[in-house]
Image: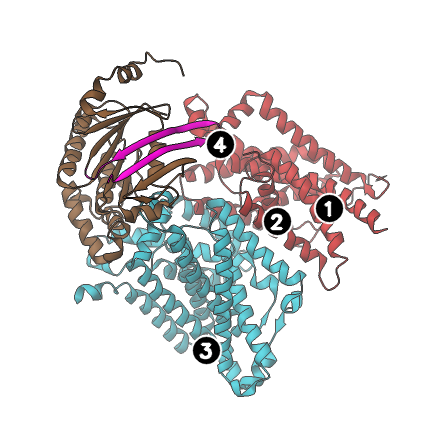
Amino acid sequence: MEVEQLTGNLLQGLVLGAVYGMATMGLSLIFGVLRIVNVGHGAFIMVGAFITLWLFNAFGINPLLAIPFAFMFGMGLGLIFYYAAIRKLRNAPELATLLVTFSFGILLEEVVKFIFGSEFRGYNWIVGKVNLGVTVLPMSKMYACFGSALVALLLYLWFNKTRAGVAMRSVVQDSEGARVCGVNVGGVYAFSFALGIGLTVVSGVMLTMFIPVGINPYMGGGYTLKAFVIAVLGGLSSPYGAFFGGLIFGLIENGSYTLFALIPGVEPFAMTRFLSFAMLLIILLIKPTGLLSTK
Amino acid sequence: MKKKLIKFYPLIPVFTVYILLFFIGKNVPGMWQLVAMLLFYCALGQAFNIFLGMTGYVDFGYVAFMGVGTYGMALAITRLASIEELGIGIIVAGFALALLMSTLLSLAVGAVALRLRGAYFAIATIGVNEGLRFLIEGARIWNGSEGLIFVSDINNILGRDTADALMTFWADVMVLVIAALAAVVTLYYMRSKIGYALTALREDEDAAKVMGINVTKYKIIAFITSSCFAGLIGAASWALKTPYVFPPEVFEIQYTIEAIIIVLLGGAGTLLGPVAGGLIYGISKYYLAVYVPGFQLLIFAPIIIVIITLFPEGILGMLKNRFQNTGLAHFII
Amino acid sequence: MPLLKLENVTKRFGGLIAVNRVNLEIKAGQFIGIVGPNGSGKTTLFNIVNGVFFPEEGKVIFEDQNITILPPYKRAPLGIARTFQIPRPFCGATVRENIAVGAMFGTHGRYVNVDESLEIADNTIKRVGLRKHRDKPAGILTPVEKKLMEIARALAMKPKLLLMDEAMAGMHPNDIDRMVDFIKKIATEEKIAIVAMVEHIMRALLGMAEKIIVLHHGAKLVDAPTKEALEDPKVVEVYLGKNTKK
């Protein structure tokens, strides 16, 4: 009985983990290319969630169709923020970029609160369920999982098969060298920031497919922290590392929840969160470049 | 002799501000609440500046030290409440415990996180803060997520009148004393080798090492000092003013952010900066809450972005440049 | 007793051997030139001497003390100072503060207080001719001034051994003359051993060296008195590019 429950939870964890992973790719991409930690990360996820919610509730648009819209919107936001502030902070101390990205997050939260209010919302998208033997999953969660995996795959192909993708990779490895080789480094920075934000907003769509309730302007904070743990798991500067980090994180989160629930006298939810941060510290200590990186 | 005294001139404007605040609060009716808030923000800025400003390391988990300080006071009061002859000594015990707990935590965090640099350090400290909060809630330490409520304990042991005076007035005076103490320590560091070592490692850690500076030692000194002040502020302002403690409140990352804003706004690594930053931040927050309730953050966020992109040196940086070769230069650092 | 002795020092980065079994001896007060093209392992060698890297093999001995795995901040007080190829001033601090840091944590660091250090800084500033920049932030100096300031900072440490990494790289010819004169001056005035590292054979500077060491692909190619070294056919080969095989 408990074994079956654990397997079911782990499977759920894997499905959720794919979404988590996708939700961290933008963070890793921006850190990898620009060496900036986007502390306002979760707010961009929240924007994606609201886009989905708004399109669904106001126009009845299928959340899957919200993805391209969210992506374009995120790219636009990214470009605006890049040219408004990030570009001027290229050589500024870390403190400045941390605080500016944090302020972006606050700004987005407050604007969304201004427009939509701060109560919790949700939507109800019924597309059936699928029985996986040990557990039953709504199809929407499967869409979110496969959608995330597909985005990760597309990003991988784009990085490796297109000229722009290769240029971006060269900047990650050696920005000075890339500049010498004629790569428009400034352009790559702007585009990477926009792409990172675009991906993050899309992940907000995916997350609402997984959890279509609890949407509110401040929902992003928790995801920012989870994304940090996942990004560090995956090596902080590698988007694919982040994707696999997400899978591992999803497994650990759901698996440990089941186990903590068996221990009397503890609150399993809080202990699960504690475990993820303990993991973060341990990984940072023993291998700050990430468990999944070969460096 | 005069040369020796000149060194302490920068304390004059700081103390003038604190004394003025105290008298305004004491004598203008209805002002004490605002003054108390300003004192809190000045103290917070001064305390955090010792680490953030002087080392350039971003500790996103700074509020955790205020949190354990609050718990220190709370634990002392709840555990010692039965010993009635302790009287006001219980507050002293509370501060001692707050100091001890924040020191221990800063030693542990410092030993682990200070090996990391830049973004890795910042992320690790977020992990410490959140991890600690969820450990307290999850393992039900110190009453877990139900928190500790000790209003009745304070009333019992001190008597209602003393307890009221403590909560509404003396706690804020204690914050004032802590802020003044932080200013003295900051200036002492700035004028000693510690300050020079910290400046060097903030600007270029590897070069500092080659110059013979034991960077780990000086980072830890700044970290522990700053964290201890945070613990004291938590004990005085949070535990004594509002005699209860809940994990989500005392580990709220928002306070770390406020502290960062204050330090940056005023000028990181300066003595007068955090005071100026605390005053401006506190006053604007207070009046924004009065005139545009609910929209403070909407207004703050763009302002922060503008300040950081256009005036990265903060207010003090600008003042310093302006008064560089005048007599006032001795007062402004 | 040699001041500094390297015994069979080897340092690898992954599969790449940056420094390969290098032996070296420097006597107190000696002026030595280390020459080698870019990537020949010069900077790595410096980093081994001042402790930024620890070698995988071999020993570093300073005044009879084995310092092979001593952290850098413990080596500076022994009397090892360096300047960087690209100057690394503490940009936000003033020139005076920068140099005072040298005095404070250098060889006599333990015995001087802040005021004395600032006094040493003032004297050093006069000597290098940066007096009018004394209270400016070091970050706004010109590249040449930064180099001078870095040397002043190193001198304020009162070192026994001064490692100068490309003191003239990227300088205008006029400035190079000024810098060479300056280095000559401190070499004669101070009783410190100077190891100057240059990418190209600079007769102006190397002329005053007692001996020259030529590094090539991490290994010592030549170690001879200046005159011999400069005429060594192997050196000519390295610099005229006849030896193109890697």
Q: Is residue A159 magenta?
A: no
Q: CA distance from mark 4 to mark 2?
A: 31 Å
Read off the magenta span.
C1-29
Nearest-to-viewer mark from 3 and 2: 2
Q: Which chain is cyan?
A: B
Crowd rating for badge 3 (residues with CA inside 10 Å; few <14, some 14–19, many 20+): some
In the drawing, does residue A270 fall left or right of residue B116?
Answer: right
Crowd rating for badge 4 (residues with CA inside 10 Å; few <14, some 14–19, many 20+): many
Q: Are marks 4 and 2 in contact (CB under 8 Å)?
A: no
Same subunit, tags 4 and 2: yes
Q: CA distance from mark 3 to mark 2?
A: 42 Å
Residue drawn at x 44%, y 44% is A94
Which colour denotes chain C? brown
Q: Which mark is residue A279?
A: 2
Q: Which mark is residue A189?
A: 4
Q: Which residue is mark 1?
A: A211
Q: Which chain is red?
A: A
What's the residue type where badge 1 is placed? Ile
Q: Are marks 1 and 3 in contact (CB under 8 Å)?
A: no
Q: CA distance from mark 3 to mark 4?
A: 53 Å
